[in-house]
Amino acid sequence: MNESGIEGVDVDGVGGSSPSNQPAWLTVGADFLAPTIGELTASFARWFERQDTGHSLWPPFDRWLRDTLNQFFRARRVRCFRVNESDRRLTSMSGDLDNTFWLGASPPSLVEHVRSCARRYVQGAANNGELIARLAAEWPRAMGSDSSPVVTGPAPVWLLPIRSQGQTIGLLAVGELPEGTLHDAPTLQAVGHLIELYWGHVHLADALETVRRTDQASGVLSRVDLSAMAEQVLHESITEDEPIILLAISVEGIRRLDDAGQWVLRDWLIKRIGLTLRQKVRSDDLVGRFNDDRFVAVLRRLDLSLGRLIAAKLLASARAVVNEQAVLRDTVHLRCGLAEAVSEGLPIVLGRAFDALRQARLQHQDIVVAAMKDAPTPQAMAEVRS
């Protein structure tokens, strides 16, 4: 078995060797398709069974897909992208690979057309049409500006939009394919359907894991999963010598809503604050609900000065939610405590953030930053462990 998990497949053919230097399927046409489909699906099943669903499946799926397409079809310059739910932008599924096609947040027009219209593109296909031909011809002329990307290599020869429930959730871009495969429409169509099926399976598995980790009332991470993931992020930040900020936000007055029997309003507020915080943090940051009236966020690659600015923006966004309901404006108040992680474990950093939060309440301030030299008080550590 190789790195991609493909067993019993010779790279010069399917299930055996070829008399030439070319893969067997390039000389026998579509006759290879049925056994190849079986091998692809078996390979995916073996790969998926080995995965730990407690961690993100997308980077290993990216590696498997690139390796598999290269071994079965000699595909090169393969890149996989997901569509962000928040801003609908394409994001590479592999953080360790450069985008071999373009630089910048906005893709070239050809890619954007394929994504938005959910239409597959094959270079030189007879049914491309005038618009597709024009967009493909424009690729090497893209110079880059404030509104256009910088092209870094030749245009893809195959673009495959991944669809789920009427929306594009991903995109596969292939830079090179052997001529025999590129012009074999039945093969590309069948393999495209399979890739979309595999991708959808990973998408659903990821969604199920997200639901399992999510606090149902707020829509952010539950306390248990927040703690586990935050420990991992802190460890990575120390190893990579990156600054990291932990902030705690309290929703003061939430218990008065309970005492007044305003449970529907209370649930609405918690859900909206959780949604707002999740939308405002970056994709690799963490935000979770620590207890009934506290949210905790872990912000990567930020020092205290920048972390305070981000905290102020998060607090302002959450406060705008409170102000949507007149009855909440004088009932609920939001405060924030910040702490910078150096080499301590999560309980120590969290305890310092809770102490800063308590100081903010006593001093009637919105935000207080914990001093680096301060050790957490016993009261804060008790709250961390409770």
Image (tube, helix red, strand yellow):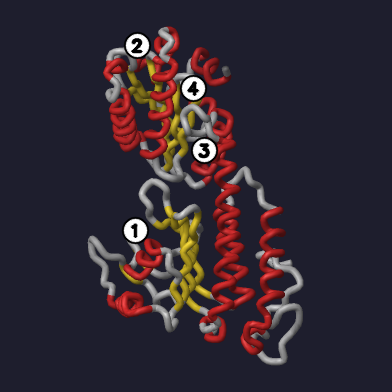
Left or right of 64 in this view: 121: left
Q: Residues within 10 Å of mark 1 (few under 14, many from 20)?
A: few
Which numbered disc, 4 or 3, marks the residue that appears first in the sequence? 3
Q: Nearer the viewer, residue 176 or 257?
A: 257
The residue drawn where x is 58% and y is 34% is 228
The residue tagged 1 is 105
The residue tagged 3 is 234
Residue 370 at least partly seen: no
Local secondary structure at mark 1: loop
Local secondary structure at mark 2: helix
Tell me the kind of residue under disc 3: Leu
Left or right of 175 in this view: 328: left
Residue 177 coordinates in the image, percent (x, y): 52, 79
The residue drawn where x is 47% and y is 37% is 286
Task: Note whether 23 is above or below 377 in the view shown.
Answer: below
Residue 283 coordinates in the image, percent (x, y): 43, 45
Asked if the residues shown at circle 2 and circle 3 are in contact, with their CB atoms under 8 angstroms apart, the answer is no
Left or right of 170 in this view: 195: right
Q: Tell me the CA gap for discs 1 and 4.
A: 38 Å
Task: Check the picture and name the quadrant holding the C terminus.
Answer: top right
Asked if the residues shown at circle 1 and circle 3 are in contact, with their CB atoms under 8 angstroms apart, the answer is no
Q: Residue furthest left?
A: 146
Which of discs 1 and 3 lies nearer the camera? The answer is 1
Local secondary structure at mark 4: helix
The residue tagged 2 is 362
Tell me the kind of residue under disc 2: Leu
Task: Note whether 219 is above or below 365 in the view shown.
Answer: below
Q: Tell me the CA gap for discs 1 and 3.
A: 28 Å
Q: Tell me the CA gap for discs 2 and 4.
A: 17 Å
Tell me the kind of residue under disc 4: Gly
